[in-house]
Image (cartoon, grey):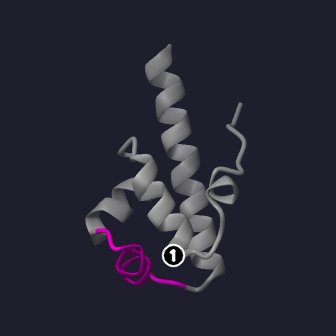
Amino acid sequence: MNNIKNKELMLALGRRVRYLRKRKKLTMEELAADAGIEYKQLANVELGKVNTTISTAHAIAKALEISLGKLFDFELKK
């Protein structure tokens, strides 16, 4: 059960990052560079393939010019 919840959280965060990135009209390459992370790492976050670290999430939020709280402002699909 816990693995299912983790996967749902990872997918929800990925959708949120993609939404915010596109809203700012940034490419994945641009956001990754602004956040100081590898493109592949950002791609894996957006695809919900990795349970990212809080420091990576913070770097993404900072690059998007939002708070960490805003980055995690999403609801899980039921």
- Residue 44 among magenta residues: no
Instruction: Kindly tell me whether residue 9 is visible in this rendering.
Output: yes
Q: Position of residue 44 (x, y in %)?
A: 35, 55
Residue ID at (44%, 78%) = 31
Image quadrant in which you'd find residue 3 = top left
Magenta residues (range): 26-37
Looking at the magenta stretch, what is its main secondary structure? helix
Q: Is residue 31 above or below residue 18?
A: below
Instruction: Give SS at disc 1.
Output: helix
* Quarter that holds the C terminus: top right
* Residue under label 1: 63
Q: Is residue 19 above or below residue 22?
A: above
Q: In front here: 31 or 66?
A: 66
Image quadrant in which you'd find residue 50 = top left
Q: In front here: 4 or 24?
A: 24
Q: Is residue 56 above or below residue 28?
A: above
- Left-right relation of 28 to 69: left
Badge 1 amino acid: Ala
The furthest residue to the top: 1
Instruction: Kindly tell me whether residue 47 is visible in this rendering.
Output: no
Q: In front here: 59 or 13?
A: 59
- Left-right relation of 52 to 58: left
Crowding near pointer 1: few (<14 within 10 Å), some, many (20+)?
some
Residue ID at (59%, 77%) = 22
- Left-right relation of 60 to 29: right
Q: Position of residue 69 (x, y in %)?
A: 68, 53
Q: Is residue 28 above or below residue 17?
A: below
